[in-house]
Amino acid sequence: MPSCGGTPRVIDITWAARPGMRTTGYLRRRIVIVLLLALAYYGTLELPSPYNMSLITAIPFGLAIGTFAAANVRGERTVLGSRPMVWLGNYLVRLLHDAGRRALLAAPGGAGR
């Protein structure tokens, strides 16, 4: 969404920050997100089967993804942006891509037959 000057505007959907508003309390936001994720984990242990992995975890994980994405766009350093985590993410993408490719080739009627 372009602003008046033509540059894209960052909208922090996790805390509804207004454009031009100072972003203070970043540590507090991350602590709240971690507490919500811990509460969601506890909820997965207590809720019955259809709801324990989808309903209770959707909101905290959505907030966590939004918070880390907004911090990344603002140029802040996060744990997920550290060098080991980026390396691990690149490695896992390659690993999953290779596993998916092998599964498709080995499937009956797949590309390998």
Image (cartoon, rainbow, N blue to C red):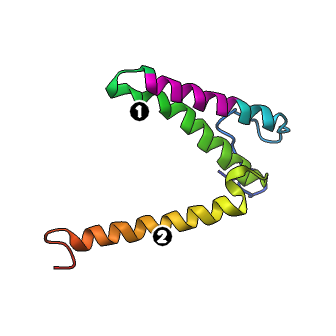
Report the amino acid beneath label 2: Arg
Residue placed most toward the observer, 90 or 60: 90
Characterize the magenta stretch by its predominant secondary structure.
Answer: helix
- Picture coordinates of residue 41, whole percent (x, y): 52, 30
Q: Magenta stretch: give its range.
A: 32-45
The structure residue drawn at horizontal position 59% and vertical position 62%, both measured from the top left corner, is 88
Name the element at disc 1. Answer: loop
Task: Please give the residue where the numbered disc 1 appears in the rendered image.
Answer: 53
Instruction: Give the residue furthest to the front.
Output: 45
Residue placed most toward the observer, 19 or 57: 57
| Number of other residues with Cα within 10 Å of mark 1, as a class: few under 14, some 14 to 19, many 20 or more | some
Look at the image and say whether residue 58 sits in the magenta stretch: no
The structure residue drawn at horizontal position 35% and vertical position 21%, both measured from the top left corner, is 48
Can the viewer see residue 5 in this picture?
A: yes
Task: Please give the residue where the numbered disc 2 appears in the rendered image.
Answer: 94
Q: In this view, does 35 lie to the left or right of 47?
A: right
Residue placed most toward the observer, 39 or 69: 39
The structure residue drawn at horizontal position 52% and vertical position 25%, both measured from the top left corner, is 42
